[in-house]
Amino acid sequence: MPQLSDATRGRILFGGDYNPEQWPEELWQEDVRLMKEAGVNSVTVGVFSWAKFEPTPGAREFGWLDRLMDLLHENGIGVVLATPTSSPPPWMGRLHPETLPRDADGRVEWWGGRQHFAHSSAVYRSHAAAITEDLAARYGGHPALTMWHINNEYCTYDWGDEAAAAFRRWLQDRYGTLDALNTAWGTAFWSQGYDDWEGILPPRHAHYMNNPTQVLDFKRFTSDALLECYLAERDIVARHTPHIPVTTNFMPFWQGQDGWAWAEREDIVSVDIYPDPRDPLGAQYGALIHDLTRSQARGGPWTVMEQAAGPVNWRGVNHPKPRGLNRLWSLQAVARGADAVCYFQWRQSRQGAEKFHSGMVSHAGERGRTFQEVKRIGAELALLSGKVADTRVVGADVAVLLDWNAWWASQQDGRLSCEVDHQSVVRAWHRALWEADITASFAHPEHDLSAYKLVVVPQLYLLTDRAIDNLVGYVRGGGTLVSGFLTGVADQDDRVRPGGMDERLRALFGIRTLHEWWPLDADEKVEAEGFRGTLWSEEIEAADDTYVVVPYKGGELDGFPAVLRKGRAWYLSTLPEPEALWPLLAGIAEDAGVRPPLDHLPADVEAVRRGELLFLLHHGRDTVTVPVPGRHRDLLTGEDVVDAVELGRYGVVVLEAAP
């Protein structure tokens, strides 16, 4: 199986999406000159080129790409060649309207934007396979080719008729019989029992709430249908080039794909990441995406396929990155395991919907601040390549559990609180670990957890029997487990388990009875001894052998446990405010034997160990001094560091122990 190292070849890849079809061919030589000046060694080509390749049905115009591939190779720049199937040409929708997706209300999503394809359309899949086949046959042997990039940001939904037929086939494979489906979906409620497979539709617009398990299965199906599209194209290019790795780019922490299932089928795990420069926790969000992507890559190197060199164009207000922030966040990705740092896009577009989205070469040109900063990043990545490429992050001894099925089920219309957003809860727990200077990984609840000293469960509303047994076995085997509220409530069919939480988990955490859930309003807090809780609270009766670590104080829940513990299993029935959650988790982690990469870090300084190197990243603007016992050398400057190092605004050092 090919892997990222087959493309990096001992380097950190640096570059971005290159869309030369937007520009006169005379500009290509200028682009290559600037790429070499910036240290670019990899570009992604062809992502949105389908109409250029196939301007009319069946036509093939590859001459321009022949010349481009040759030019890039002659200048030492590798090509990540994309299949252009995320944006079909307008003629396809016009001639084959069945290739256009429909929303839950039956409205057609027309051409004129992008991602306007119906994933289950046989016509779309046939055309996608044909263009992929021809690209692979023509360029599979080209020396510039280093990687295949399939489609782009798979994110479409479709409630149309072909999707409905495919959904029914998927359900037949899953359940086998209508009786099994009716049982799983609980169709006795609201007279929803099905007597014929043809009566089953996607969860289209209904008078009132849709069946929640039908919605859950439709999300599972959609992820699988998109995965079928990916696999079909992956298999075509792999047949032509079994030695060339294949990837597609995930959107960051996005709920539309089962990220674990997809990552298992990729040679390289790639992600697009766009933290808001104005977000005071933008660096923590970046760290979360890095940790998740690295974990999907089974702990190995991964790629930043897209980031912004400056502003994006899709927020309400699109702020530029202050001086130094692009460099800081790029090196943060490398610290947390990235072996490729790439952008959307190389040259900022002058037309189209994303002309205000930044590029490595902005509208200001090569004299602009953006390109000057890009050049510095390229030079520094070249300095690090020999020491960093193909190494792993060290000391990620804490696993944060995440399961897309639980996420999907927790967002159903009939839930107890729309204020409880799964993504936000996960981010709050990861933030606590990040602020405690603890390097975290992510894992699926059915993964082997034995290597982790601490496992945290921010929230897993839905858990399979296998996952529950895995958690119980982890604690019995000596592991420390900390779980957040509303965990283990439902089984794989979103059927509430007796007692409101699985009995194995209640026994594990020392919960005799879960009497009632008490969700909180958006601005409401619940008092506990030593902190205030947010979002949620629970009326829990602890078993006799359970220690109530923190009780609620006052109100309806006075005296009931906010935090309880039975042996090495902890349960939090609320979400403590940030200033309380991180010291709580830090103390539990320390007792479990987890240590930060470096002690006594100043505020706003992040430390990560990768291979033999220590990365120190300063996310603040004021100069700080970081104690670093011993003698080191900063690989970015070549300077010696003895016992301490000073970091200025957005400063970074990459330290190697001196002999």
Image (tube, helix red, strand yellow):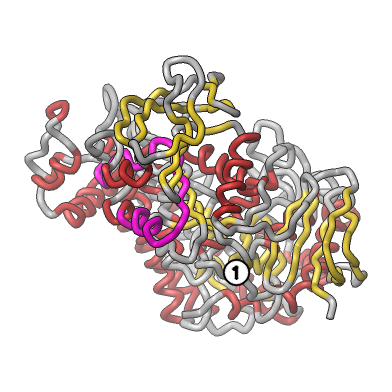
Residue 418 left/right relative to 491: right
Residue 435 left/right relative to 165: right
- The boundaries of the magenta stretch are 469-493
Residue 202 left/right relative to 632: left
Name the amino acid type tagged 1.
Answer: Pro
Queried whether the magenta region covers residue 473, the answer comes back as: yes
On the image, the x and y values in percent for residue 73 come to 70, 80
Q: Quadrant of residue 311?
A: top right
Residue 368 left/right relative to 198: right
Give 614 or 130, whichever is nearer the viewer. Answer: 614
Q: Quadrant of residue 517?
A: top left
On the image, the x and y values in percent for residue 555 come to 47, 15
Q: Residue furthest top?
A: 555
Counting every numbered tag in the picture gives 1
The residue at 81%/68% (across/down) is 655
Would you say residue 26 is visible in this rendering? Answer: no
Give 29 or 427, whichever is nearer the viewer. Answer: 427
The residue where tag 1 is placed is 301
The residue at 82%/58% (across/down) is 652
On the image, the x and y values in percent for residue 409 come to 35, 40
On the image, the x and y values in percent for residue 130 come to 40, 68
In the depicted structure, whether residue 56 falls above or below residue 143 = above
Q: Quadrant of residue 373?
A: bottom right
Secondary structure beneath label 1? loop
